[in-house]
């Protein structure tokens, strides 16, 4: 059996940070920073932040939720994407309030086990087309956030994911719960939803470094509110980011 070469994630993340620092110093960012306010509004107008990592995306006749949590109901879902099995991301109670009999759930195996019927299991690297929506599952994991020495909150081997979904021709990247990881350099999107609260995920500073390496036109900070992180983290991220940033209001 062939084994994959090991990636020294510590050096990789340092490289991300160094490159981001160079980009910030020169005023250069991925895809440029000349997007007009009207264009930023257009790209984000169908993205609704429900707090924490939870979003509703409307488009192409579909209603898509990502990690619904404490949503208190809402428009019924055609598609629900779950990034991992933690209770504030894979919540059967919240899913039940927005699920129809034909709603399709996409989730890694550990999270999929919480649900029944119409569940599509994914792992990092998978690409799907569901009801005309293009979905790519991408890696999401910690490199420097630990629940105990040597035990990350989100281990790479657990198969947690982020998603890139294409809606109305716009590629939207939901990073999931993650640190700045080398795989982000391969992400090409129009809108990036990045966690910024620290402790379990990237700090605002780390997220700014990651944003500079992702090929994106605009960033929306997340993983704040609902008891985890503060909107001040999102504001701090915005001041640090070399990429145009939009802080959505919680709906």
Image: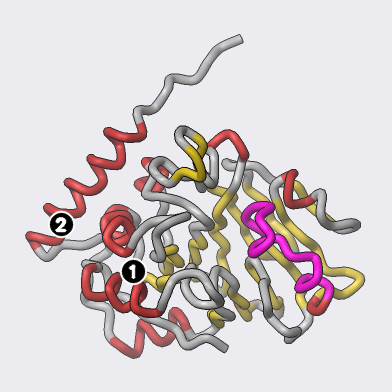
Residue that sits furthest to the left in the current view: 26
Identify the residue under disc 2.
23
Q: Which residues are magenta?
A: 82-96
- Count of residue discs: 2
Which is more N-terminal, label 1 or label 2?
Answer: 2
Residue, x 27% and y 33% (percent of image)? 11
Is 240 a magenta residue? no
- Residue 13: x %, y % from top left: 30, 42
**Residue 118 is drawn in which quadrant?**
bottom right
The residue closer to the viewer here, 185 or 153, is 153
86 part of magenta stretch: yes
Does 183 appear above or below 99? above
Locate residue 130 relative to residue 244 in the image: left or right: right
Disc 2 on helix, strand or loop?
Answer: helix
Is 112 situated left or right of 21 in this image?
Answer: right
Question: Tag 1's secondary structure?
Answer: loop
Secondary structure that dominates the magenta span: loop
Residue 95: x, y in percent? Answer: 78, 70
Q: Residue furthest front?
A: 148
Q: Quadrant of the C terminus?
A: bottom right
Q: Nearer the viewer, mark 2 or mark 1?
A: 2
Q: Who is closer to the viewer here, 122 or 195?
A: 195
Residue 239 is situated, as x and y percent measured from the top left of the image, at: 22, 75
Q: Which residue is mark 1?
A: 217
């Amino acid at each position: 059996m062939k084994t994959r070469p090991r990636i020294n994630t510590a050096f990789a993340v340092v490289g991300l940070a160094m490159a981001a620092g160079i980009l910030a110093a020169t005023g250069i960012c991925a895809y440029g920073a000349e997007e007009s306010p009207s264009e930023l509004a257009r790209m984000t107008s169908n993205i609704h932040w429900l707090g924490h990592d939870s979003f509703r995306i409307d488009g192409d006749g579909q209603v898509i939720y990502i990690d619904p949590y404490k949503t208190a109901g809402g428009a019924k879902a055609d598609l629900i994407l779950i990034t991992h099995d933690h209770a504030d991301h894979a919540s059967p109670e919240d899913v039940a309030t927005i699920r129809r009999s034909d709603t399709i759930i996409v989730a890694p195996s550990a999270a999929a086990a919480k649900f029944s019927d119409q569940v599509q299991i994914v792992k990092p690297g998978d690409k799907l087309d569901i009801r005309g929506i293009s979905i790519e599952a991408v890696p999401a994991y910690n490199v420097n956030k630990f629940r105990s020495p040597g035990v990350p909150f989100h281990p790479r081997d657990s198969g947690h994911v982020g998603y890139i979904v294409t809606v109305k021709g716009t590629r939207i990247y939901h990073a999931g719960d993650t640190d700045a990881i080398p795989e982000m350099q391969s992400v090409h999107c129009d809108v990036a939803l990045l966690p910024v609260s620290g402790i379990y995920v990237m700090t605002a500073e780390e997220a700014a470094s990651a944003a500079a390496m992702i090929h994106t036109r605009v960033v929306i900070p997340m993983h704040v509110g609902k008891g985890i992180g503060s909107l001040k983290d999102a504001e701090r991220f915005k001041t640090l980011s070399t990429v145009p940033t939009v802080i959505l209001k919680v709906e």
